[in-house]
Amino acid sequence: MRHLSASWMRSTGPRHLVLAAVLVLATGCSPEGSETGTTGSPAATGSPTGPGPGDGTGPGGPGGGEAMPTPGFLSSPDCPAGSTAAATPSGAAGTDRAAAAVLAATQAFLGTLDAEQKTAVAAERSQANLSQWSNLPDQLFKRAGLRMDKLNSDQQTAVAKILQAALSEQGYRQVTQITTADGVLADQGGMNLDFGADHYWIRILGTPSASETWTLQYGGHHLAVNATMAGNTMTLAPTFWGAQPAGYTEASTEVEPLCGETVKAFKLIGALDETQRKAAVLTTPVTEIVLGAGKDGKTLAAEGVKASTFTAEQKTLLLDLVSEWITPLNAEQATAKLKAAQDNLDATTFAWYGATEIGNPIYYRIQGPTFTIEFAHQQGGGANAGGITHIHSIYREPGNDYGAELGS
């Protein structure tokens, strides 16, 4: 509980945290979207041609603040001690202990609420409600549910127990490290866009049940966890993982919430031969995720190098990278999803844009029959600046976002 408790102490502020990242921030932030001015993949189908102005993914951070040196560990091929990294799930696929634990924790949380709070946190599981999430700060996006800083300590603890049941240890730490980073960012001052380490919302769509489909939403600036349960099966699709700053120091420990997602990608692109790398690199600049907030139901045409051309070692690196988005889910549920990814690895593609040496801003995309992954450093100027210190990423399951196929 240490990490989550620290992230919810915004009333006193995480003063023990030391910012260790470049915060190249503008004097303002527009709710219209990205200000990078780049375009996305022209091969997108059923989706816009690029993020550009007006894209719903939005700017990632507020304005103001002085630029500081980028910490060296953001350019290291290894993750610092305080970072999360995927581990092989130890749970058995197909069991129902995790789903039952999530249900029990959710019902316990609801039991701590008064009538007004119960009304605020619960909503119909409609597409409009499912889609009501964003990576924007609260001032730029109207959220619903209950915000952590409005809950008492017992209620906050109850929320933590829901997350701990739904997520793996790695996934739970990743959530708390991302929210703590938002507290670091808030402490730097600049434009007040109503964000911080405890400005994260919980919402429950549908009726928590052992047999019906229902969704737990937890998110705010740079985080949107959508956990859907149907019986004893679960999914985190879609979930937005972001970070700003991408690296910071907490109690003398270097922390990088999305380190595995970064270093493993550079290891994979570095392991490709010249022909494979040429196939992987996109010719059209892409510097922002395309299937972020507001893009439910959209798809992307497969691009990049085919994993069917990979050696056994390259396939291992690819699967290790994919696992970074699957293993935040609790071990029981992640096991089956990792097996599906492995079984369909030859049908998976890997696309890249940017330099291939770690320490440079990049975009990459991994697409398989059961998932779509995008990762982008926020480049350029204005509110989306920051380069390697500012990350957006998304995990989706085409056809199964919000558990559309669960129980079918």
Image (tube, helix red, strand yellow):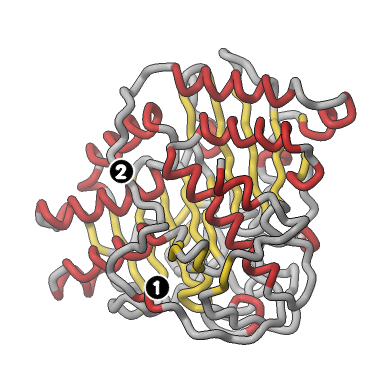
Disc 1 marks which amino acid? Leu
- Residue at image position (48%, 36%) is 167
Q: Nearer the viewer, residue 85 or 357?
A: 85
- Residue at image position (69%, 30%) is 205
Query: Which residue is outermost to the right?
Result: 116
Badge 2 density bin: few <14, some 14–19, many ≥20, Cα 10 Å: some
Callout 2: helix, strand or loop? loop
- Residue at image position (57%, 14%) is 210
In the rendered image, the vertical position of residue 258 relative to residue 358, given as above or below: above
Q: On the picture, is 202 further left or further right than 180?
A: right
Task: Report the residue marked by disc 1.
Answer: 74
Q: Nearer the viewer, residue 163 or 32?
A: 163
Q: On the picture, is 332 further left or further right than 176?
A: left
Q: Quadrant of residue 293?
A: bottom right
Q: Nearer the viewer, residue 305 or 311?
A: 311
Callout 1: helix, strand or loop? helix
